[in-house]
Amino acid sequence: MKKIISIILISISLSFCYAQDDITVLSLNDFHGQVEPNKNMVGAPKIASFIEKYRKTHPNLVVVAAGDNYQGTAISNISHGDVVNEFFDYIGLKYSAVGNHDFDYGQKWFKHWYKTSDVRFLAANIRYVNDALSGYIVRFFTEKYSLDYIKPFGYQTLPSGKTIYFIGLSTLETPETTAEKNISNLSFTNPVIAANKWIKYINDYKKHDIPKPDTIVLLTHIPTDQDNTNIFFSKRKDLNGESEIYAVVNNVKNISAVLTGHSHKFVNGTKNGVVVEQGESQGKDISVLHYDCHTTNRCVVTPEVVNLAKATKDLQPNKQVQAIIDKYKDSVKDELEKVITKAPVALPQHGQDNFYNSPLVYTFADIVKNQTDSDIGLLNGNGVRRSLPKGDITYGMIYESMPFDNMIVTFDIKGKDLLDVIKHSIIQKGDVTTGVLAGADIQLDKSANIQKVVINGKPLKKNKIYKLATMDFIYTGGDGFSFRGVSNYKDTNITVRDMIVNYWSKYPANIAKGWQSIKAQN
C-alpha cells in the first residue's frame, strides 16, 4: 500500500513540476498528412484534444513541427496540405522545419502556405544556388537571408516572460530524397556552419533589436536513431566522416535541444548535454521539452516523448478539427471511395524475406514494366507508403500507397551499367531494398554479393542493350541512383499511380508472378 501511495505521490509531484514549466515545447515530426486515425496513429482530432488539455496545465506552451507535414494521405495531397495547416492553426502550431517531402508539391506552395496559414517554415541551411557571388557575400556579412517564405529562425516569448528561439535545419539528404525538379534552384548547406552563424546573431540580440534568448533549440529534419546504450547515430556520414546528428550535437554550441525527424524513429536522450528527440511519425508520439528557468540561473531542460495512443485513450476527438477534416473529405469523397479493383489476397509493402522481396512494390514495378514494354521495371522501395488489404481496393488506398506524382520514364541502358543499378538497388533501406526490379532474377551469396542476374529468363549480358522503365525521381538521382550510358530517353508524362489505376481498373490486383526475385543464401 505504501508503494502504491509513493507512486501516486511521485506522479502528482512530476505533474506539478511540469505544470510549473517556464517553457514547454511540443513537437510533431513527419506527420505526413495523417489527419485521420489509423491503427496506432490517433489522428488530428485526438491530438487537438490532447494539446487543448495539455495547454491548461502548461500555459507556457509552444507547438512546433519537425517537417514532412503534408505528403502521405490522399486528403492532404489533394488539398496540397491545406487540411493539415487548418489543423495546425487550430492547435496553435507556430514553426516548422522544412522536410524533404515538403517540396513535393513544388516551391510555389510555400508561398501559398505563408499566405493562408500562421505556420512559419524555418531553415537556416537552404539557399538559392543562382545567387550572384557578390550578392551572397553581401547577404552573409550583413546577416540577411535570401530564401523566400522561409526564415532561418523564429522565437516565442511566453506568459512566463521567457523567450525560446528555434533555428531550422534541413537534412543534407534532401537532394536525393526529393524530386530534382522541385529543388533544382536550391542549395542545402552545412547545418553546423548555418546554425552557429545564427546562434551568434541571436546572442547579439541587443544589436539586432530582438528579445534576449533564454534558450535556443534546433528544429530540424535531420535523421536520428538510438540504440539501447543511448547512443544516437545515422548510417550516413555526410560531414567530415560524421553523421549529420553527430556533427550538429558535437559542433553547435549554446543550444539546449535538437528536435529531429526524417528517420521515423523513437529517440529520447542526451548527448554532450544536449537533448535529442524524435517521436516516430504520423502522430504516433509527440516530443516534449520541459524547461525550468527559475530554480537556477539558466533554463534546464527535461525531455519526454509521449505515446499519443496511450495519452489520448480516454479523450474524445475534437469536434472542430473533425469538422475541418469532414469539409475536405466531402469535397473528394466520391473520388477517394471509388472502388478500382479487388485484391484476392493482401499485398504487403515491406520485404518478406528479411528486407528482400516486397510483394506490393514488385507488383507495381511489374505493371510499369509491362505497360511500357520494357525489360526492367524499377521503383524505389520506400516510395510505396502503405500495404493494400484483401478485398476492395479504392482510389484513396492506391493514392496513399503511391502518393507521389512521379512520372514514368523509359530509356535504353547497357547491361554493364544496368548491373551497377542492380547493385545499388539491393542495398537495404528500412524494411525493403532501395530499389525493386521487376524482370530481373538476382542470386546473392552469403555476403549479399551478386552471383547471377537473369533478365527475362536469360543471363544478363554486359554489352546487350536493355530497356528500363522507372520514375523521374529515380532517374534524376533520387535515393542515390545514377545511370550511365543512357540512350533513347522518353518521358511518358504518366504518373506511376495513374498507370496502376488504369491497369487495375481492368484487372484484379494479383501479386505479380516472380515477386520473390531475389534469392539470398543463408
Image (cartoon, rainbow, N blue to C red):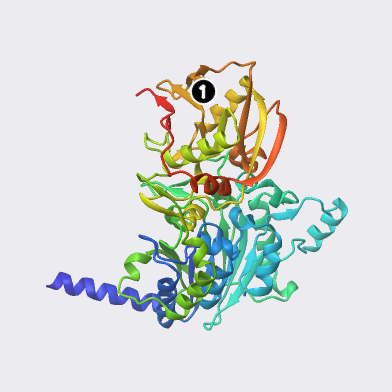
Q: Quadrant of the N terminus?
A: bottom left
Mark 1, other Cα within 10 Å: few <14 / some 14–19 / many ≥20: few
Residue 294 can be seen in this image: no
Place of residue 92 in the rendered image (x, y in percent of width and height, measured from the top left): 54, 76
Q: In the image, what residue occupies the spot 67% across and 40% down?
A: 476
Q: Quadrant of residue 39?
A: bottom left
Q: Is residue 519 above or below residue 388?
A: above
Q: Nearer the viewer, residue 453 or 154?
A: 453
x and y percentages locating residue 208 in the rendered image: 74, 72
Looking at the picture, does residue 423 appear above or below residue 194?
A: above
Q: Nearer the viewer, residue 364 or 308?
A: 364
Question: According to the image, label 1 marks what residue?
Answer: 456
**Closest to the observer, 265 or 103:** 103
Residue lying at the far right of the rendered structure: 134
Q: Quadrant of the C terminus?
A: top left
Using the image, determine if residue 158 lies above or below residue 447. Answer: below
Where residue 237 sits in the image (x, y, percent)?
Answer: 57, 40
Whether residue 496 is visible here, answered yes or no, is yes
Q: Is residue 270 left or right of residue 39?
A: right
The quadrant holding residue 466 is: top right
Residue 198 in which image quadrant? bottom right
| Residue 32 vertical placement versus 251 (above, below) | below
Q: Amino acid at mark 1?
A: Asn
